[in-house]
Amino acid sequence: MHYPWWYVPHLTSPMLIAAIAVVHVLVSHYAVGGGLFLAVETTYAYKTGDRKYLDYLRRHAKFFVLLTVAFGAITGVGIWWTIGLASPLATQVLINTFLFGWAMEWVFFVVEICSAFIFFYYWGRLPEKTHMAIGWIYGIAAWISLVLITGITAFMLQPGSWIEDRNFWSGLLNPQFLPQTVARTGGALLLTSLYVYFHAAIVLSDEKLRARISRRSLRPAGLGAVLVLVGVFWFLYELPASALLAIPSAATLNIFVALLAGMTLVILIALYVGPYRNPQWLSPGFAGMLLVVGFATVGISEFVREAIRKPFIIYNVVLGNQILTDEVPAVQAAGYLESGIWTKAWMERKYPQVFVEDRIDARRLLQLTPSSRIEVGQTLFQYHCNDCHAIEVGYSPAGPLLGEGTVEEFRHLVLNLHESRFFMPPFCGTIEEAHVLAEYLMTIAQPTPEGMYFGGRQNGESVR
Amino acid sequence: MDPQSLITGPTGPLPAPYWFIQLFKTVGFWMHMIPMNLWFAGILIAMMGRTFGCPFARHFSHRLMSQMPILVALGINFGIVPLLFLQVGYFSFFYAATILTAWFWLSIVAILIPAYYGVYFYAFFRGGSEQGGVLRILVGWSVAGLFLLLGLLFANGLSLMVHVDAWGPIWEKTAVAGATLGLGSNLADANLYERWGIMFGLGTLTTAAWIVLDTAWFLRDVDSEWLAAYHGWTRRAAGILTVSGAILFVTAGSFYVFKTWSSELFEYMFTGIRLPLTVLTAVSPGLVFVACLRLGKKPRVDTSAALGMVLAQLTVLGLNAVSRQVVQNFQVGAYLDIGSLPTQVQWSPLISFLVLLLLGLAVIGWMVAQVIRTVRAEGKPSISR
């Protein structure tokens, strides 16, 4: 509406954010937990004079820098790239609200980059105390980055009193801030242990050292598990009612939440029977399996966290379809096509006949030819619906979801979107716009499959 | 289609004063340009040296490419600052232009990943030989090409940002019912190639300054005869690159100013207080040339002469960053007066940021000091031949 809508057939452009974000969090959590791990373990190894362990830590630091400084940093920028493309209005609100939050996070990012390189490149050259100190500088800077970013992402789920006072600190220290910080810190520590297991299993042939690493890495894993459990329950407790209800309302989320609980349990059991009871089990296969389950757990938890915000991108501030909630009444009164900068420009170019004194007269939409009405309906679909729904095939496609219906039925559905489904946004247009959208929906709606038996008559014989 | 009708307004008051946004956007871009220049033009120069150059050129190539992982990381990191402040003030232009060219814009991220890992591969992988094998050289050339391409893709998006009258035609060409497929490009805009050429000229100049800096400040070698010869090569290489960079800059810059600027922009930049800025920006590579001459014919490139060359190039980059900002403000100002947008300064976050910035710089300063102390204490070659 405020910006051109980026149409990505089948996938929908916001799913690109999800794809990049999930890959990024797998590395960014390790960037935090791994930094703390290296700081703690390097300090331990120096203090105990354990040269073998130090040699391993050096190899791990190389792997860590190669993965986090390059891939982690670029995918982090990648998320920023994609949110600007697929969700520009929400990005604009976030940047306007948290300009100095991002700026502060950047300061810690610079410190991270410098300390990571010095820690790695000058390993064995810096005095031990200085080397340890630089490891701790990295670990602390990385964790503060996590804290700041979590404040901003948690704001999207629950802005709290920011809605009333529009104060930076109210927004950053929102009700979800602490629970998510605790959960993410725990996730970072737990995931890091899984990375360490995998890396050690691949590069180390010394079984004794592997077993020692296996045992030592249980500490962050255990602490991480406790923090994750506390954080997740706290997170659920603080969720807005709509987000909490979204979980049982969507079958996918139901399954995902059950999967999350199950996979977390699998990881904890595997850590107990593996590294704790049988540290010699640390084979590439076992460690790889643990890491894959860890990845799946983190990836799914991010998906759930994003999905339960519906119908908002920023809870109560920006709707999923790039409209500010404060704008809704005015847009409904004036019409979506008229209110949208790019929709109005498109209509002006394609259908100047619907304009009266430089404004779209919604009644004239119904005077267009049937094919033109369908085209206008498609424009409304692109801008109003395509954020969450592919057309006929792809991510949550509207066609199969709609099923059979008449124009009247679809118009009724459109006009009462949020009343019948709380996770849908309200329709932000006029009755006439709802009508042309319904006419377009008729062209993509897929008939109820034939051959279904409902007691006495088969489907295809007008069940409705 | 009236381009003005495609400009959107703010969602709320700006959180920082206009001057603050301008300052950090410009300074951030200046900081970004330094390492970015070294990967944009420097990698190509290093690969030319590696493939066609003398042993000294190969040595420099090896040194620069070994430093490149850090330079790329710093370049990406410093690029965040101007992009952040760009999105605060210039949201209307930035989002629309990048969405219309979405796939090209997003491909920057996709290309940067292999380019960056290519740099790491080149820096760390020798394949058992002193200089590495054919694969390493192929990777090096590919990386050079990828970074040149990245520059073009950046220029594609950001030149469209200020080319508002091109939005409508690009949008219509790639629209599906009013939504864009994100396949638009601004490659037909001559402005883009000139900007790209100017940056390549600046990159060549920055590489010249880096050669001198690296030799005078970072290079240590026990073989004094070899070292003296390398210093001689440094002067020659810096001279050649300075002249080449200046010619590229002036040629591309002349086309940019005289062929692509509108008469209004031309008049604006050549009147009032902008006139000295424009002229100084145009002739600034001369500063680097003069500084290069100061290197003289002494047996060693001394540190003060090297510092002079570095400061001269930093001035060139600074003048370019300021001039670009003034031009950009004029171009977008025709559609939206960013300076008059409502502002409600977030004072306590702003001060917190500045305090943290100072603390962060102090911490970085301390870490760098530890490195310098360690290297001095070792007193041995920093990178072996």
Image (cartoon, grey):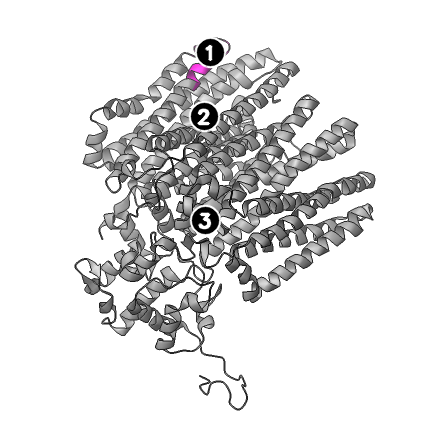
Between tags 3 and 1, which lies in front?
3
- Horizontal and vertical percent position of residue B124: 61, 33
Q: Which mark is residue B207?
A: 2
Q: Amino acid at mark 3?
A: Thr
- Residue B234 is situated, as x and y percent measured from the top left of the image, at 48, 18
In the image, is residue B267 above or below residue A191?
above
- Amino acid type assigned to the residue bearing label 1 in the image: Ser
Question: Which residue is label 3 attached to?
Answer: A82
Q: Residue at x 68, y 21 (%)?
A: A127
Query: Label 1 marks which chain's residue?
Result: B
Q: Chain of mark 2?
A: B
Q: In this rendering, would A219 be left or right of A351? A: right
- Label pair 2/1, CB-CB below 8 angstroms: no
Say above or below: B125 vs B221.
below
* Badge 3: chain ID: A
Q: Is residue B302 magenta?
A: yes
Q: Which residue is mark 1?
A: B304
Are callouts 3 and 1 both on one chain?
no
